[in-house]
Image (cartoon, coloured by chain):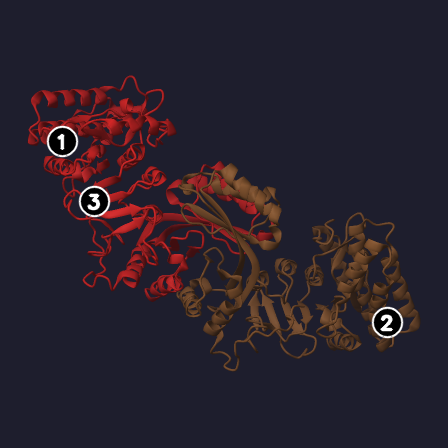
Chain colours: A red, B brown
Amino acid sequence: MKVAKFGGTSLANAEQIKKVCSIIRADQDRRLIVVSAPGKRCKDDTKVTDLLIRYAERYLETGEASAEKQEIFGRYQEIARELQLPCEVVAQIEAELDEVLSNRKMLAADRFMDAVKAAGEDTCAKVVAHYLRSLGEDARYINPEAAGMLVTDEVGNAHVLPEAYEKLSALRSKSGITVFPGFFGFTEAGDLVTFSRGGSDITGSILAAAVKADVYENFTDVDSVYVVNPNLIERPVEVKEITYREMRELSYSGFGVFHEEALSPAYQADIPVCIKNTNNPSAPGTMIVSEPPVSTKRVSGIASDSGFCSIYVSKYLMNKEIGFGRKLLQILEEESLSYEHTPSGIDNISVILRERDLTADKEQRIVERIQNELQVDDVTVTHGLALVMIVGEGMRQSVGTTARAATALAAAKINLEMINQGSSEVSMMFGVKAEEADRAVIALYQEFFGCESEEQEAFARHSSSVMV
Amino acid sequence: MKVAKFGGTSLANAEQIKKVCSIIRADQDRRLIVVSAPGKRCKDDTKVTDLLIRYAERYLETGEASAEKQEIFGRYQEIARELQLPCEVVAQIEAELDEVLSNRKMLAADRFMDAVKAAGEDTCAKVVAHYLRSLGEDARYINPEAAGMLVTDEVGNAHVLPEAYEKLSALRSKSGITVFPGFFGFTEAGDLVTFSRGGSDITGSILAAAVKADVYENFTDVDSVYVVNPNLIERPVEVKEITYREMRELSYSGFGVFHEEALSPAYQADIPVCIKNTNNPSAPGTMIVSEPPVSTKRVSGIASDSGFCSIYVSKYLMNKEIGFGRKLLQILEEESLSYEHTPSGIDNISVILRERDLTADKEQRIVERIQNELQVDDVTVTHGLALVMIVGEGMRQSVGTTARAATALAAAKINLEMINQGSSEVSMMFGVKAEEADRAVIALYQEFFGCESEEQEAFARHSSSVMV
């Protein structure tokens, strides 16, 4: 049994949905299908999820958003018409969608928002199931609540509950094709809650783990994962196989192919993941597996992410003070801040964190608390950092990877604000100024992959990224 | 006014003490003198402090240690005889020493040990003061309690109390030469307590700060600080000037020239420190100052220290778990462990600490607590690590220092277990296997200083180190 998840661009219009259904029908093991909401049909288009958010925001603000609602209906109507779905089916789907969009009274604002957002996937799953039936397949939509997708009650950021797996495992014995809407689940009290944005990948991963799938196929719009962001390098080297750990580190640092939290269920259940292209299903794609190929000593990918800042703290003889680091981290914890890294010297420590988490007033409070409670000599916050990461199993055992990387960066005149290497066996991290991050990635790509594909040229395309 | 401190080898015998006194007399600003206990006269000799410890241990064990006591008396008698001190002076010094060594009844064992240890410096200060007087100088010994050297009640590891500075500042207006025994002070209750081993440097630094000395001269047995351990490189490059921060980082990582805690008082009071050679006082020595020379972008020194271990902890999605790092550090704190560094990946963190602090049962307890309380995927302790440090003001602004260092290490086939760079502005740290540390230091020296002195050759002398 295979679990196949299709992303937004794979479902953006009727033509894409036809491709999806032909992929499903081409392999009778593809029996559990997870769908996103329809994505962009072209570069300047708007994703259905964004239309839904816009609708809900306007409705919450003014109590009326008929133009926005019509745009959403328009998208589905166009799809249904081109798929030639029966009128009564379309009417029913529309009625159900309308019920969700109009059901403001019973819900708090945030629950209303979650319910509206989820309607994108939910409606899409119904459309796909009906279209498969119209093709003669034994296919049906399933409601996540009925299926047992139990999640925590964290609006917009739900996490699966352990007991969901047992319930969802029953999907394995269902006959025919089951179409499951991604992105949301239900609390034990029966409230609909969504995962974080892009959460259909999470749904697919949970289902693959629950039914012990042979493989979790994740269909997107690229032939494979690339070793570097293709917006920076033209036709970069493709990744044929990558480990969960490598993928996890790449997802963390801006690799948008796969949702950061989505690997976890598949990883825990040891289900291989295959990233494939809806528009080119015969391409082998990228396999994500648990063990690296034997005797691997290679760089698997290079990624970067900006939006980091650092809090630098210095105090003479800091390293003699038992509990200093713990007290510093406690202040962050009390401000509900998670941090990323803590490089340290003898008498100083820097805490690297996501800029989006550090609001101006949190920053002020934290700086004051560090000064007053820790009696430090200096505390300075620096914004505008990027982390550039080189990822590869076995890299750590390879003498000279650091030297090659640092030399390539120095040749590109990029100063290293930070290096973090030594805990992870599969990655090496360089902190650089955000404005130098792209140049750093290009320099590292040329160093580690430059000879593998001679045609590529460093350039910065200003197109949208390839994120699912 | 200059504060001059003389180390153990500078006072090892009468000949050395004569050199010391001639240095004191050569500059009338040298009015506050701090002395260590007599050190080794030759390579296989025993320091007086070690004789005293041996005496105290045996006395505490058996109630008798006359052979050990006689050896101590023998050292001072030989010195007094060769300095031709008057008999009655020698008799009085001996009687005072004997009183300390016999004063077991009134003291707890640890206080007795501290009192006996301190007698090495105390007796030496008296000898030097009397010898200066015999040369016609207006010189006198001063007792640290009378002078106001107030310290915390931490036996064997005292720290100066803030109010000591005010009291000690009166030494500035004393006429003539004051000889102050290093290494110990008194609590507010009047108990004698020593600093940590090598603590005469601390005494000198405190006095220099208290009297606002023009310079704190620290006389040892080398012409200057070298950029690298001279046991590894023959005739290494000398350091003419170095900043407090650089010196602090070098002291931390095994540079034995100056006690790690001793810089603090001088640094806080902005008193320049000069490291000089008792055996070659005309050599300019090494100046430790607060500000680096303008436009410095250079490596000032390379050092290493072994005896580190790492606790590696991994847990999937660790970086999403607010408070994880804090809880980990709290476990260490509850075991009274201070840690050095915490390099981290996405889902893992390593804590680097001194091996001597992590006893076998602490290690077992900590590993169990991490497993049980933090529910981690993996926890592994690795022993036998060394930290190699490159230190230099302005280094961080210099693109390419990392590349040069990493390339030199890779060429020497040394694998990097860890890199920590980014918090300190003046250092870069590499973790390597302990057995590769010397080779790493040699490789880095050749890279950064190889051209400055062509005669040197890498070699590993098996002599004792040049530590004071």
Residue A309 can be seen, yes or no: yes
Q: State the residue at coordinates (50%, 40%).
A: B371
Q: A40 or A180: nearer the eye? A: A180
Q: Are marks 1 and 3 on the same chain?
A: yes
Residue A358 can be seen, yes or no: no
Query: What chain letter is assigned to the residue under label 3?
Result: A
Q: Where residue B291 appears, x then y in whole percent?
A: 54, 64
Residue assigned mark 1? A75
- Residue most toward the bottom? B455
Q: A328 or A238: nearer the eye? A: A238
Residue assigned mark 3? A276
Which amino acid type is marked by label 1? Arg
Is disc 2 surrounded by few (<14), some (14 to 19) or many (20+) residues within 10 Å?
some
Residue assigned mark 2? B77
Q: Is residue A71 left or right of residue B108?
A: left
Q: CA distance from mark 1 to mark 2?
A: 103 Å
Q: Is residue B296 above or below residue A165?
A: below
Q: Earlier in the sequence, mark 1 or mark 3?
A: 1
Q: Secondary structure at mark 3?
A: strand
Q: Nearer the viewer, mark 1 or mark 2?
A: 2
